[in-house]
Image (cartoon, grey):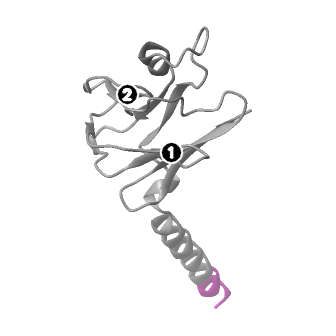
Amino acid sequence: MSRLVSRLAVAAAASSALAAVAAVPASASPAVGFGAIQYDSPGKDTRSNASLNAEWVTLTNRSDRTVDLGGWTLSDASRHTYRFHLKLSAHRSVKVHTGIGRDTAADVYWGSRAYVWNNDRDTATLKDSRGRVVAVKSWR
């Protein structure tokens, strides 16, 4: 009988472990996350479009599938928010520039006429189309 109880205990533990894995939200292991971030535009801050576009955040799709970023948002600690309207191919990155420009598959533009990212301290937050946090990156 003790052998049966042991087997039942092992089966129950395995079942609980599988249920716990199934309960992990997709955002806990995101396919899309932050790559390099240039929060301090090189050189003097002139607020020119070139200087604004030298401030950027990179997102990388680490999965084997294209991810539809439509409705996803990127925001800073002050709640400046960029809304995505693109699909990010597998193993590709997109750079989100602060200023104005023409969007491509590799570069998109926030359209801001002022710097978004604070040089001394800020937090970049990526949320999916349902508003769930996918990734967070902070600096000091």
Q: Residue at x 30, y 34 (%)?
A: 90
Asked if the magenta segment contains residue 3, the reply would be: yes
Compared with residue 13, is residue 102 higher up or lower down, i.e. above or below? above
Q: Can residue 92 be seen here?
A: no
> Which percent across, then down, holds residue 111?
37, 32
Q: Residue furthest bottom?
A: 1
Q: Quadrant of the N terminus?
A: bottom right
How packed is label 1: few (under 14 Cα within 10 Å), some, or many (20 or more)?
A: some
Checking the image for residue 93, the label placed there is 2
Main secondary structure along the magenta-highlighted residues: helix
Residue highlighted by disc 1: 80
> Which percent across, then down, holds residue 53?
44, 20
In 3D space, how far apart are the residues under numbered discs 1 and 2 (Cα atoms)? 22 Å
Circle 2 SS class: strand
Mark 1 or 2 closer to N-term?
1
Q: Residue furthest top?
A: 43
> Which percent across, then down, holds residue 89?
27, 34
* Residue range of the region highlighted in magenta in the rendering: 1-6
